Image: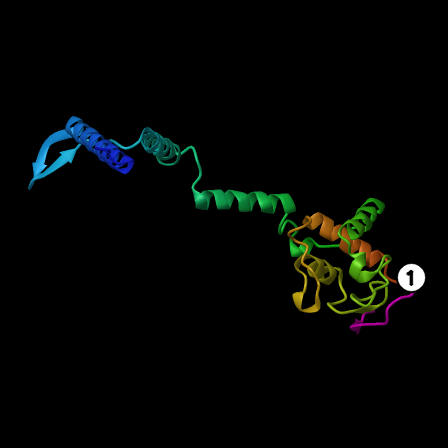
Amino acid sequence: MIIPVRYHLKKREMEEKYDKNQEQIHDADEHSMDHNYDGIQELDNPPPRWIMAIFYITIAFSIFYAAHFFWFKSGDMQLEKYAKKSAAHDAKYNMNAVPEGDLGALMSEADLAAGAEVYTSMNCFTCHGQHGEGNPIGPNLTDNYWLNGCGFENIYEIIKNGNPAKGMTAFKAQISDTKIRQVASYVMSIQGSNPANPKGPQGEACE
């Protein structure tokens, strides 16, 4: 009698399934625990080693974090870190370093040269022209007409805090109070210089 090949393949497949089931039963027996609840046998089946490694690393990090921030207090929490960064920022840019009553133009050659350098480096000429003559964007800085007051304090204030409604950028977060004072002094020094192609008067006349 000739047995079809398909029969042998089916038999082999069933034998392989049986062997696999026996292995699973054997593994279950090896990992079986004494705990039995309502006919349900508990198995000791530990998680993979890589998961346990992450778990132990997390515990170690939490201990280090607690020791660093709470026990030894060698680290700054968010509010303390923010306060220190704010203080460092204010110190870097000399925020409110010059009392309003002490404001005055710095008319020495060194200060005016520094102010001219700030005028160039901060691209003030983009809105006010290379020599302060003004352009379609910004007003003329060399005539006697001003949009934001006539005094040195007014120039200092508008450079420092800006005027978004009129397109003037605030420079207090970009340069120090000293540099603002120098560039304001430079603007004062170029009044009446009569550059070529000046823009027409804007604002109020200042005597």
User: In percent of the image, x 7 and y 40: which residue is there?
Assistant: 39
Find the residue positioned furthest to the top.
Answer: 30
* Towards the viewer: 52 or 72: 52
* Towards the viewer: 7 or 162: 7
The reply, left or right, for residue 49 in relation to residue 109 is left
Spot occupied by residue 161 in the image (x, y as percentages of width and height)? 66, 59
Q: Is residue 16 above or below residue 117?
A: above
Numbered label tally: 1
User: In percent of the image, x 74 and y 67: which residue is there?
Assistant: 149
Spot occupied by residue 90 in the image (x, y as percentages of width and height)? 59, 47
Mark 1 residue element = loop
The reply, left or right, for residue 60 in relation to residue 35 is right
Q: Residues within 10 Å of mark 1 (few under 14, many from 20)?
A: some
Q: Which residues are magenta?
A: 196-207
Q: Judge whether residue 204 can be spotted in this image.
A: yes
The colour scheme used here is rainbow
The reply, left or right, for residue 56 in relation to residue 158 is left
The reply, left or right, for residue 88 in relation to residue 121 is left
* Towards the viewer: 57 or 18: 18
Spot occupied by residue 49 in the image (x, y as percentages of width and height)? 32, 28
Which quarter of the figure has residue 185?
bottom right
Say whether residue 197 is magenta. Answer: yes
User: In percent of the image, x 70 and y 68: which residue is there?
Assistant: 166
Spot occupied by residue 89 in the image (x, y as percentages of width and height)? 59, 45
Q: Judge whether residue 45 can be spotted in this image.
A: no
* Towards the viewer: 61 or 36: 36
Q: Amino acid at mark 1?
A: Pro
Query: To which residue does mark 1 refer?
Result: 195
User: In percent of the image, x 36 and y 36: which residue is there?
Assistant: 70
Q: Quadrant of the C terminus?
A: bottom right
Q: Quadrant of the N terminus?
A: top left
Magenta-highlighted stretch: main secondary structure?
Answer: loop
